[in-house]
Image (cartoon, rainbow, N blue to C red):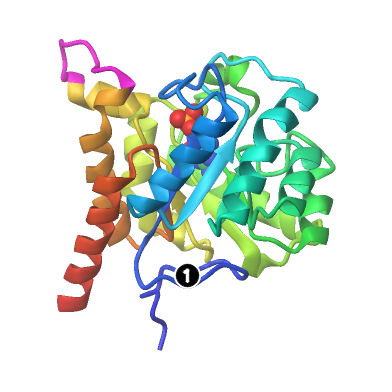
Amino acid sequence: MDTSQGRGRPLGLPVWDRCAVMGVVNVTPDSFSDGGRWFDEELAVKHGLDLVAQGADLVDVGGESTRPGAKRVDEAEELRRVIPVVAELASAGVLVSVDTMRAAVAERAVAAGARLVNDVSGGQADPAMIPVVAAAAVPFVVMHWRGQSIDMNNRAVYADVLAEVRDELRAGLDRAVAGGIAPERIVLDPGLGFAKTAEHDLTLLAHLDRLRELGRPLLVAASRKRFLGRVLAGTAGAPPPARERDAATAAVTAIAARERAWAVRVHEVHASADAVRVARAIEGAA
Ligand code: PMM
């Protein structure tokens, strides 16, 4: 029996009988929702362990902010931020994902114990990424991406966002497979907020079933993003700050879990961990 209830799962990771929860540890001074809070190795490791205690199934460690307008950090700095945190969490038994666009960071992180590579560019930013992931034989997240964060908002232009994101995700999947990554190891992600307006994000969330038709597990990363600020602000008000968007994030988690997303990527784990369990209980009763 398929215990994952049709949500699929990437080869090489455990099977959960519900949507998985990926907690976020940004080892950055400037991420848009939690920049600076965990910008210290010891604090970052402690935060990762806390997220697991709150119910995270995996912890995604990143050392480069991708918020709109962000400039790139250099590779040496990214390695310095990420590798010790990955190594410590992995040695504590945490299932670690590395959030990077750089092949060298992915390679070193896998050597340090990371079990999944999450590349927001889906292998487009660094031509060495796909060969490195193929050789490492680890699961790979291909996110929908139209270019670096510095000017991505200019690329939020679609005639039909759903069709275009689907086609571009399929092309990303094909590129990864052509480069030697086993299709069974690939996860797709609509890339909410990346070269997308709030309306684009909401349309994609309304049609996760259409993205699931691509035949790969889906990762949904709505946590604290701008579109939630826009929804909560209503027509006239100001959006609440990123850290006041966790209840809204958990609402997306419940919906994504019902839409059979493989996993959600969230900053605040507790509420999303509850949400995926409630969604699972409802599925079990259906
Ligand atoms: N978003 C961010 C960072 N990494 N990874 C995936 N797979 N999907 C995303 O949408 C995504 C990501 C940016 O958010 P953050 O700076 O709050 O972590």
Q: Main secondary structure of the magenta part?
A: loop
The residue range painted magenta reads 233-242
Establish if 225 lies above or below 178. above
Residue under the image location 70 percent in, 39 percent down = 83
Q: Which residue is mark 1?
A: 8
Q: Residues within 10 Å of mark 1 (few under 14, many from 20)?
A: many
Q: Position of residue 153 (x, y in %)?
A: 51, 18
Establish if 274 lies above or below 35. below
Could you tell whether 101 is left or right of 231 in the image? right
Residue under the image location 36 percent in, 36 percent down = 223
Is residue 135 highlighted in magenta? no
Image label count: 1
Establish if 146 lies above or below 216. above
Comparing 207 with 55, the one in front is 55
Residue under the image location 61 percent in, 70 percent down = 11
Is residue 241 highlighted in magenta? yes
Residue under the image location 16 percent in, 20 percent down = 234
Establish if 135 lies above or below 231. below
Q: Quadrant of residue 265?
A: top left
What SS does tag 1 mark? loop
Q: Can the viewer see residue 158 in this picture?
A: no
Q: Position of residue 142 (x, y in %)?
A: 61, 48
